[in-house]
Amino acid sequence: MGGNGPLEDPIEEAERIESAARAAQVGIKLLGGAGIHIHSPSAHRPPLRRKYGDLDYAMPKRDRKAALALFPALGYEANERFNLMQGDRRLYFFDNAHNRQVDVFIDSIRMSHVIDLRERLDCEGPCATPSDLLLSKLQIYEMNRKDLVDLTALLLDHPVAGGSDEALDPDYIARLTAEDWGFYRTMQVNIDKLDATLDELEIDRDLVRSRLAEIWKAVEDRAKPLKWRLRAQVGDRVKWYELPEEVRSPYQPDE
């Protein structure tokens, strides 16, 4: 299955994994920069083209056993200890030849914030929806320039429209942030960072800003429950995000 082992190019490798997963009927969806690259033509050329490293996926819990068989068959080493302890929420595999890790989130992305994907993983294609790709980046508290570049490509190439798996759905985004003030606050911080970064990029900045503004208006206009409003009163005085621990491969030497 899947040839002689992982490929050096991460995008080609993601395509190899997708083909093998489809054949094995494993419902994994690509996340992260590689997922945005596949969804967004603007990520294929400067100034938004970049190199990719690790691969991130999401999948439904029903496919956990199949994924545990799929990745070793494709030439990956499973982190047995991690998968035993955390395997109900996340699986971890490693490509020794290219020093690349694969994270597979089960049902939900759990990083700085939680994004429940249980009703979101039956979309067409190899990747999560543009809305979920956007949220998976905007939930990162320690966002870096690569994340900002990826977000820019996504916003350039996808309109804002409700009820579409191929657009950025403002109603869905607003609903998630209305359920969690912390998520709202991190998104607010990251949108400010993105807006500041746009001036450094030779792209259609007005288009990106107009789409950001449309999404943020939906977020602000959404009615907030009492729990959200009480947490908002506390504000930044109490930490509102998690800093995910980095998972080290047992095959990597200690630094």
Image (cartoon, rainbow, N blue to C red):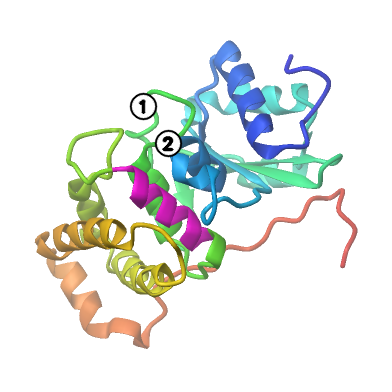
Task: Please identify the quadrant where the C terminus is shown.
Answer: bottom right
Whether residue 103 is in magenta: the answer is no
Q: Residues within 10 Å of mark 2 (few under 14, many from 20)?
A: many
- Residue 161, disc: none
Categorize mark 1 by other alpha carbons within 10 Å: few (<14), some (14-19), many (20+): some
- For label 1, the residue is 123
Q: Secondary structure at mark 2?
A: loop
Range of the magenta residues?
147-158
Q: Is residue 145 left or right of residue 158?
A: right
Q: How many marks?
A: 2
| Residue on which disc 2 sits | 128
Looking at the image, can residue 113 be seen? no
Q: Position of residue 169 (x, y in %)?
A: 23, 44
Give the CA distance from mark 1 to mark 2: 7 Å
Q: Of residues 210 and 91, which is closer to you in this image? A: 210
Q: Residue furthest right?
A: 253
Residue 155 in magenta stretch: yes
Residue 63 is at least partly visible in this image: yes
| The N terminus: image quadrant | top right
Compared with residue 53, is residue 229 higher up or lower down, i.e. above or below? below
- Please identify the residue farthest to the top as the structure is shown: 23
Tell me the element at label 1.
loop
Q: Nearer the viewer, residue 86 or 152?
A: 152
Tag 1: residue type? Cys
Q: Position of residue 214 (x, y in %)?
A: 18, 57
Closer-to-camera residue (110/39): 39
> What amino acid is labelled 2 in the image?
Ala
Classify residue 117 as left or right of residue 144.
left
